[in-house]
Every structure is written in C-alpha cells, then in structure tokens.
Image (spheres, grey):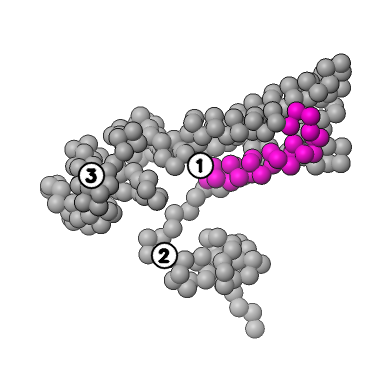
C-alpha cells in the first residue's frame, strides 16, 4: 500500500519539484490496519483515498466509513489513542508558522479513568495494599504508552480525579471517622509530596505525573532490528538480545560511541 501511494506521488503535477521530493511530500504512517495520510493539497488526499479503496477492493476488503475521514491538521485527528493537532504560532517560535502537539485522546483518558474507577469500586472492602496492587500495573502501563507525547497536563488531571475517587473510597469505609483521620490513615508523605496513597509499611500508588516524559526517537528509514547493528539498537532500546543490559546503558550514555580500553 505504501509503495502504491508513493508511485502515485510521482505523478502529481507540481512544477519544479523532483519525483523524490514529491514522494517525501506525501506521507503515510501505518500501524497494523490503522493508517493516516497527509499532504498539503486536499485533492491529493482524496485521490489517495480512492487509490487505497481500489487496492483494498481488489483483495476483497474495504475502508470502514466510520473510521475514515478527511480533516485539516489544524482541526486535529485521532490516531492510535492520541490526538494529533497543529496550532498556529508566531514565526519566532516556528519557521513554519505552526507547531504540532500530540496528546492522549479524550476517549482514551476517559477509558483509563473508568478502568481505575471500576477497580476501586470492586475493592470497597479490600485492604489498601490489595487495591494498590491492582491499580499499580494499570497506571504504569498507561503512562508508559503515553509518556512519549505531551502528557504532563493530562497525567496531573488524572491524578487529581483519582485522588478524589480514592478519598471517597476512604470516607465510605470509615463513616464515623473524621476526614482528617481518614486522610492520615491512607495518605502519607514521600519526599516533598504530602498526598501519596500509601500503606503504613510504605507500599504506595505511583502517580501519573511522576512519569518522566521521554520524546520518541524516530527509527532511521534504513534500519531493521535484524540488521546486526548492535550499537545503534542498544543505544536506542537499552535492551537488545545480543547485548547485555549494562553495556546497553553505557552505550546510551555515550550516545553510541564505543570506547575500547586495552
């Protein structure tokens, strides 16, 4: 599919533009059966939709209308659980006159909070430690997936919602106790944070906002995990089947430069 779109790109009529630059100007990003295409000319995007529809029809498949739409990047779109949108900015902020912001989608935020709420509701009478044990992997998994984009504000918002939910959980368990008593029983201080949901033994619930934002590094076009370049993949991933974890971390710190001491 990608190559069919790139072949079409070469036929686009645009004066003074080489075929290679035409191919670069028409972008297609695909993950499994989900994909997004963008180009500065809407008619080009519409033609791509027609080409892909025909390509799929030849295999007995079709585009799902409910998941297919054409939109402007300034309006934004959803892809793989993220909201991708461009915003106008001054020329001193960006030579292009806009910047691209990627955030977790509202749908995925809602789904995540509902999942956390369901776990809490199912553990109304369970010990605090058991509740933490159930919530912890859900929070870490969601944060790890979304930590490569602009998620800090979203992480803080979810923490606030979760804090309110957990406080209600605590108040319902001890209706005859004061809120101050309940707060001191289920929350404590770790470092400079006075509102950590934690047990007396120190087992605590991680906060979304404590997750470090790590920008995604695009894989070079010519790279493959099977190309045998241990230094490149260990620098990128830290972990690689043919490289020890310790050496992978060392290569990352050295930005890929390997030093041999004799």
Secondary element at image label 1: loop
Rendered position, 195 above or below 229: above
Q: How many angstroms separate mark 1 from mark 2 (CA)?
A: 23 Å
Q: Which residue is mark 3?
A: 53
| Residue neighbourhood size for the residue with mark 3, other residues' Cα within 10 Å, grouped as few (<14), some (14–19), many (≥20) | some
Q: Position of residue 211 (x, y in %)?
A: 63, 42
- Label ID, residue 223: 2
In the displayed structure, does residue 187 sit left or right of residue 32? right
Which of the marked residues, 1 or 3, is nearer the chain's N terminus? 3
Q: How many angstroms separate mark 1 from mark 3 (CA)?
A: 31 Å
In the displayed structure, does residue 66 sit left or right of residue 187? left
Identity of the residue drawn at 35% across and 46% down: 35
Which of the marked residues, 1 or 2, is nearer the chain's N terminus? 1
Secondary element at image label 2: loop
Identity of the residue drawn at 25% across and 49% down: 60
Q: Position of residue 151 (x, y in %)?
A: 55, 37
In the displayed structure, does residue 165 sit left or right of residue 19? right
Instruction: Write down the region rendered in magenta.
Output: 123-148
Q: Position of residue 123 (x, y in %)?
A: 74, 32
* Quarter holding residue 48: top left
């Amino acid at each position: 599919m990608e190559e069919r779109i790139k072949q079409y790109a070469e036929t686009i009529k645009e004066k003074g533009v080489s075929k290679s630059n035409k191919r670069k100007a028409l972008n297609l990003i695909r993950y499994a059966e989900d994909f997004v295409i963008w180009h500065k000319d809407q008619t080009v995007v519409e033609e791509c939709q027609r080409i892909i529809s025909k390509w799929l029809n030849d295999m007995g498949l079709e585009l799902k209308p409910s998941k297919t739409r054409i939109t402007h990047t300034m309006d934004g779109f959803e892809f793989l659980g993220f909201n991708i949108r461009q915003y106008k900015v001054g020329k001193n902020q960006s030579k292009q006159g806009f910047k691209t912001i990627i955030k977790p989608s509202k749908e995925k935020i809602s789904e995540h909070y509902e999942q956390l709420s369901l776990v809490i509701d199912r553990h109304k009478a369970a010990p605090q430690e058991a509740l933490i044990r159930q919530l912890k992997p859900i929070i870490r998994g969601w944060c790890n997936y979304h930590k490569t984009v602009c998620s800090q504000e979203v992480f803080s918002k979810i923490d606030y919602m979760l804090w309110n939910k957990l406080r209600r959980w605590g108040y319902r368990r001890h209706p005859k106790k004061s809120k101050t008593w309940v707060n001191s029983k289920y929350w404590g201080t770790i470092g400079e944070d006075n509102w950590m949901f934690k047990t007396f033994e120190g087992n605590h619930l991680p906060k979304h906002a404590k997750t470090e934002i790590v920008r995604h590094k695009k894989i070079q076009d010519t790279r493959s995990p099977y190309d045998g370049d241990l230094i490149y993949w260990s620098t990128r991933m830290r972990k690689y089947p043919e490289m020890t974890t310790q050496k992978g971390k060392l290569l990352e710190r050295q930005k890929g430069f390997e030093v041999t001491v004799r």
